Amino acid sequence: MVEPFRTLRVDGPGEGRARLERLSLDDLTPGDVVVRVEYSDINYKDALAVSGRGKIIRNFPLVAGIDLAGEVVSSTDPAYTAGDKVLVMGCGLSETHDGGYAEYARVRGEWIVPLPAGMDTREAMILGTAGFTAAFAVHRLEQNRQRPELGEILVTGATGGVGSIAVMMLAGRGYDVVALTGKAEATDYLKSLGAKRVVLRGELDMGTRPLETALWAGAVDNLGGDVLGWLTRTVATWGNIASIGLASASHLDTTVMPFILRGVSLIGINAGLNPREERLEIWQRMGADLKPQHLERIVTRCVGLENIIPVCAGYLEGSVTGRTLVNIGG
């Protein structure tokens, strides 16, 4: 019998509606697997949901948190038994289904990813949606023939969660990684993750020609806007750009020239829409060849449920570096 447990629940639209509440399993949205949550994390999407500044949650009230990792307590899905270590990422958590900011979660079996070999629940949530997005970007780049010997690969927005993990994963795969950031004080941090060198956004000369001098064999872009347009003009022949974010802007101003004259590929990355088989494959890679060597270096804060609300403000201000781990019961 599970006693009432702590959650962080948002009870309505607008700002200031998130609060700690005790709930029972019967209060949660339906599911066939009950998980005792050990860890979660904070992503930009979580900050929007908790603050009420973004239209993330569609059904109220709802427990926030798009990621969780923990241990199965009970299951009516024959694929899982009590004691199994599992994770859930996305799949409507914190949108239409109660999420991971709770001591217990009730989820559907088809959403669950068995914890990969070589990974514990803490590591799984240091990675979380941010890590999966970075891994999916590397996976897709390499499917499109990106290789270390082709030259330097640029990671923009490199101090954020996705960017930091992308730097580590690419460096671990043997790429010469260049990190682009607006934070000069983060240079040592980025080099400690494996960046060969660091470029400051304020020092860029983006030019205006349809094609500029080829600078990069490929790129992982978190920013969008003018930076993504510049990347299309400066990635070399047959290079790839993985577009994974819009931290700077959502527009894209470019021409067809990079695509038809250099054969540049612009690859869209949506970590929530890939088939289950691919999701399982990528998580397995995240416990093996894509597991970052310096994972703990990006954990810049570890908080409990009671500290999530104030920490989310930093995400919305753009002042957060690295990853925030939420220790719920680990």
Image: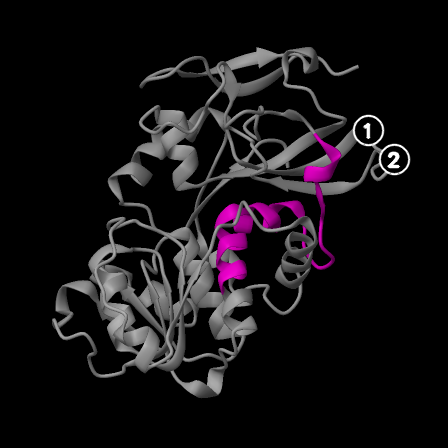
Find out whether residue 268 is within the magenta segment.
no
How many numbered circles does the render carry? 2
What residue sits 31% from the left and 50% below the top? 246
Figure check: 14 above or below 170: above
- Dot in front, 2 or 1: 2
Instruction: Identify the residue under disc 2.
Output: 78
Residue 49 percent location from the top left of the image: 41, 28
Residue 247 percent location from the top left of the image: 29, 49
Label 2 SS: loop
Find out whether residue 122 is within the magenta segment.
yes
113 vs 182, nearest the viewer: 113
Q: Amino acid at mark 2?
A: Pro
Q: How is the image coloured?
A: one colour
What residue sits 54% from the left and 25% below the top? 96
Instruction: Identify the residue under disc 1.
Output: 75
Q: Amino acid at mark 1?
A: Ser
* Residue 78 in the figure: left or right of residue 98: right
Q: Are marks 2 and 1 in contact (CB under 8 Å)?
A: yes
Residue 139 percent location from the top left of the image: 55, 66
Label 1 SS: strand
Q: Which disc, if any, is residue 37?
A: none
- Tell me which segment is drawn in magenta: 108-137
User: How many C-alpha atoms fall within 10 Å of the one at disc 1: few (<14), some, or many (≥20)?
Assistant: some
* Residue 55 in the figure: left or right of residue 290: left
Quadrant housing residue 193: bottom left
14 vs 293, nearest the viewer: 14
What residue sits 71% from the left and 59% below the top? 118
Say if residue 197 shows up in the picture.
no
* Residue 201 in the figure: left or right of residue 276: left
